[in-house]
DNA sequence: CATTGCCTGAGT
DNA sequence: ACTCAGAG
């Protein structure tokens, strides 16, 4: 709720939570989440990561180096930056600025090669770039975080070279270890556990980190004497400092063992950590104390804040006609007096408002009990290629599909080394057109050859222990055929991509289905009520045994007809095998067995229902009338939709 | 100021 | 199946 007491522009209230009272309860409690007054999170990102990867690969140190993707510069190491080279320069300009510049082109796939490589001759017409090496190096860095910070939580892998690390837990441990008296509530404490902690003992910031100054410094290159002499003055400061020590150790480790320098920001929440990570780059870390937040943030363009860099930020800037955090803060405080603001603005209003007050509410917090951050594993995998010369003949598709399939095969099998049962549910093929040609093209084509508007096609991807280039390419080619149909002439595809979605490790149920069909299933799914062949209930039976034991012979005709659905005579509903199961096997017998399992399960459902009907009245009389929380039906609005609704309300 | 090649999740 | 938004 936006607090409505916050009328006017009381200055003190803008940041009244920068020095929150911290009590014994706070330090002894462990699950306060984003509201923890001792929360500490860091964002750690690698400096000029792609360039650093190439330096490590080539054993280069300190030489100016850039990484190329075709004609464009995608990474510039710090020595090269000294020559004024940036990502947006042309290769020619870069060479002129620094004749001894090392130029490395990213690895590429070429047709027929299962693995990407650094070839002498590359050609964007026949090759596609590969970022796999960087992905693997990134995984090494991430593994180092996990290994060296077992108690910290990798809160989010933000990108290939960035991760948020939540230090709250290890910091709390360190705090209690270093200052044992914190775990003892003094007997004379006036409010027991709710008594504020005594002031922290004098300590030192050390020299690991830069400090964002509390008072803005004219000469921002150096930290003022006053700042250097300062000491951590709150328990949160102490927490930040402890996190900084841990962060520093890992960063040094990563630099010496892997050769990558990193920069980190350490603050009370993610968005602040992100904002201060680049305060001093490269190879440095900086601490943003709560007390330093206002002076650091207020002059900042609010569109630099994570999630406000897009259309949402633009909409806000336009609506309020503001550009800095301070502008927007005061504007929104004024507006917030109106009750309707919140309802119209939706979730995003509250989120933006809290952000501006230097707090962070994870959007997850709006959902009742979603303790879960987003999964640390990728759920999709996409290989794409922009064509300089568009594909004009349907016959040219398979060439690129094969290249893309090679990349997907490599990447999926890479991922499978860590997580063996990884299985992509679907394969998606996109055939995109350039922006300008698109409508012209679809117009012409739909008139001339009936090439519909569909530009992507997807299908269940068959489960396979071995995922090979051929399997993927074959499935991809099939999609391609469906997509371009029998168009013989005028297609113009400038962008082609092939990807997996719904990547998961097969969980128990999926494994049992796969196992069932492969003949390794446990028999737990075979139901008592079928009343037949319940002998030999050993947990494992071979496929053949299962067939025999269940003694449900399939007539050749019914097997031949390949039945995939059934109707329940009791509830008159129809059930069919899921596309997933259908993709697992085309064998009629196996399908029929899967269908039988479904039938069993379904009649069990009716059985359970009838039991429930008998038992329910009893439970109602006996049990407490515990009110079941109704499912939250409130529809989740995307941030932008919320904003749009708000702005369109008049 | 921008390119390209990703990646995620929501919504229709 | 497709679009949009967002970050890097």
Image: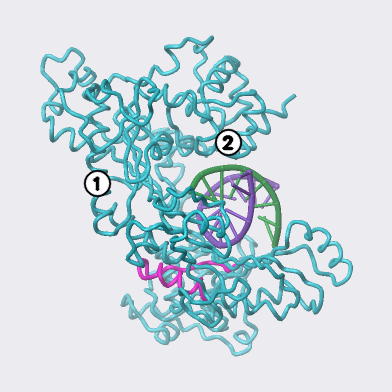
Chain colours: A cyan, B purple, C green
State the residue at coordinates (43%, 59%): A65
Q: Position of residue A534 (x, y in %)?
A: 38, 77
State the residue at coordinates (56%, 80%): A111
Q: Report which residue position mark 2 lands on.
A: A634
Q: Quadrant of residue A155?
A: top left
User: Is A269 located above or below residue A385 in the figure?
Assistant: above
Q: Is residue A80 left or right of residue A340?
A: left
User: Is C4 located above or below residue A302 in the figure?
Assistant: below
Quadrant the C terminus of chain A occupies? top right
User: Is A479 located above or below residue A305 in the figure?
Assistant: below
Callout 1: residue from which chain?
Answer: A
Q: Report which residue position mark 1 lands on.
A: A151
User: Is A8 located above or below residue A156 in the figure?
Assistant: above
What is the span of residues highlighted in magenta in the rendered image? A406-428
Q: Is residue A482 left or right of residue A358?
A: right
Q: Position of residue A264 (x, y in %)?
A: 34, 42
Judge the density around disc 2: few (<14), some (14-19), many (≥20) Cα neighbours within 10 Å. Answer: few
Q: How many marks?
A: 2
Q: Quadrant of residue A331?
A: top right
Of residues A328 and A375, the one nearer the viewer is: A328
Is A422 within the magenta?
A: yes
Judge the density around disc 1: few (<14), some (14-19), many (≥20) Cα neighbours within 10 Å. Answer: some
Is label 2 in a helix, a strand or a loop? loop
Of residues A282 and A333, the one nearer the viewer is: A282
Query: Furthest residue to the bottom?
Result: A556
Q: Earlier in the sequence, mark 2 or mark 1?
A: 1
Of the two numbered discs 2 and 1 in the rendering, the one whose residue sits closer to the viewer? 1
Is A412 within the magenta?
A: yes
Residue A108 appears in the picture as rendered: yes
């Amino acid at each position: 709720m936006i607090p409505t007491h916050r009328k006017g522009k009381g200055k003190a209230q803008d940041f009244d939570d920068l020095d929150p009272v911290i009590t014994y309860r706070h330090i002894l409690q462990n699950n306060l989440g984003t509201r923890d007054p001792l929360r500490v999170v860091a964002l750690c990102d690698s400096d000029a990561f792609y360039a650093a990867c190439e330096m490590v690969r080539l054993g280069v140190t300190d030489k100016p180096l850039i990484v190329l993707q075709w004609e464009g510069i995608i990474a510039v190491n710090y020595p090269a930056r000294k020559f004024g080279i940036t990502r947006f320069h042309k290769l020619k300009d870069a060479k002129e600025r620094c004749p001894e510049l090392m130029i490395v082109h990213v690895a590429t796939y070429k047709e027929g090669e299962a693995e990407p490589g650094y070839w002498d001759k590359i050609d964007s017409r026949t090759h596609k770039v590969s970022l796999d090496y960087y992905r693997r190096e990134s995984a090494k860095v991430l593994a180092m975080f996990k290994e060296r910070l077992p108690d910290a939580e990798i809160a989010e892998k933000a990108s290939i070279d960035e991760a948020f690390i939540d230090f709250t837990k290890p910091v709390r441990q360190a705090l209690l270890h270093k200052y044992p008296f914190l775990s003892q509530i003094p007997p004379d404490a006036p409010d027991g556990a709710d008594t504020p902690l005594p002031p922290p003992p004098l300590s030192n910031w050390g020299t690991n980190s830069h400090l964002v100054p509390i008072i803005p410094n004219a000469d921002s290159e150096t930290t003022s004497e006053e700042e250097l002499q300062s000491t951590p003055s709150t328990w949160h400061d102490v927490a930040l400092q402890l996190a900084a020590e841990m962060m520093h150790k890992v960063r040094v480790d990563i630099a010496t063992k892997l050769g990558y320098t990193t920069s980190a920001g350490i603050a009370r929440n993610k968005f602040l950590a992100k904002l201060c990570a680049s305060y001093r780059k490269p190879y440095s870390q900086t601490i943003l104390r709560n007390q330093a937040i206002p002076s650091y943030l207020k002059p900042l363009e609010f569109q630099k804040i994570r999630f406000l860099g897009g259309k949402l930020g633009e909409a806000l800037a336009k609506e309020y006609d503001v550009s800095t955090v301070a502008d927007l803060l005061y504007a929104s405080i004024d507006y917030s007096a109106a009750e309707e603001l919140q309802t119209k603005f939706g979730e995003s209003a509250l989120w933006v408002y809290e952000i501006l007050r230097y707090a962070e509410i994870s959007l997850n917090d709006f959902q009742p009990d979603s303790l879960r951050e987003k999964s640390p594993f990728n759920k999709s995998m996409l290989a794409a290629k922009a064509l300089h010369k568009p594909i004009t003949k349907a016959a040219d598709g398979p060439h690129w599909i094969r290249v893309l399939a090679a990349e997907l095969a490599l990447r999926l099998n890479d991922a499978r080394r860590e997580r063996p049962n990884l299985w992509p549910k679907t394969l998606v093929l996109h055939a995109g057109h350039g922006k300008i040609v698109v409508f012209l093209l679809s117009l012409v084509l739909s008139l001339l050859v009936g090439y519909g508007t569909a530009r992507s096609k997807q299908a269940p991807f068959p489960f396979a222990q071995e995922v090979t280039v051929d399997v993927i390419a074959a499935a991809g080619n099939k999609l391609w055929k469906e997509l371009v149909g029998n168009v013989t002439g005028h297609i113009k595809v400038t962008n082609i991509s092939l990807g997996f979605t719904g990547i998961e490790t097969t969980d128990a149920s999926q494994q049992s289905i796969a196992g069932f069909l492969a003949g390794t299933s446990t028999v737990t799914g075979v139901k008592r009520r079928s009343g037949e062949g319940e002998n030999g209930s050993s947990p494992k039976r071979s496929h053949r045994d299962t067939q025999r034991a269940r003694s449900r012979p399939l007539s050749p005709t019914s097997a031949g007809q390949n039945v995939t659905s059934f109707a329940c005579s009791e509830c008159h509903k129809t059930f069919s095998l899921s596309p997933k199961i259908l993709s697992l096997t085309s064998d009629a017998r196996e399908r029929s067995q899967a269908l039988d399992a479904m039938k069993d399960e379904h009649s069990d459902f009716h059985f359970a229902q009838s039991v429930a009907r008998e038992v329910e009245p009893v439970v109602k009389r006996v049990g407490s009338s515990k009110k079941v929380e109704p499912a939250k039906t409130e529809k989740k609005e995307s941030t932008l939709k919320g904003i749009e609704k708000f702005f369109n309300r008049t």
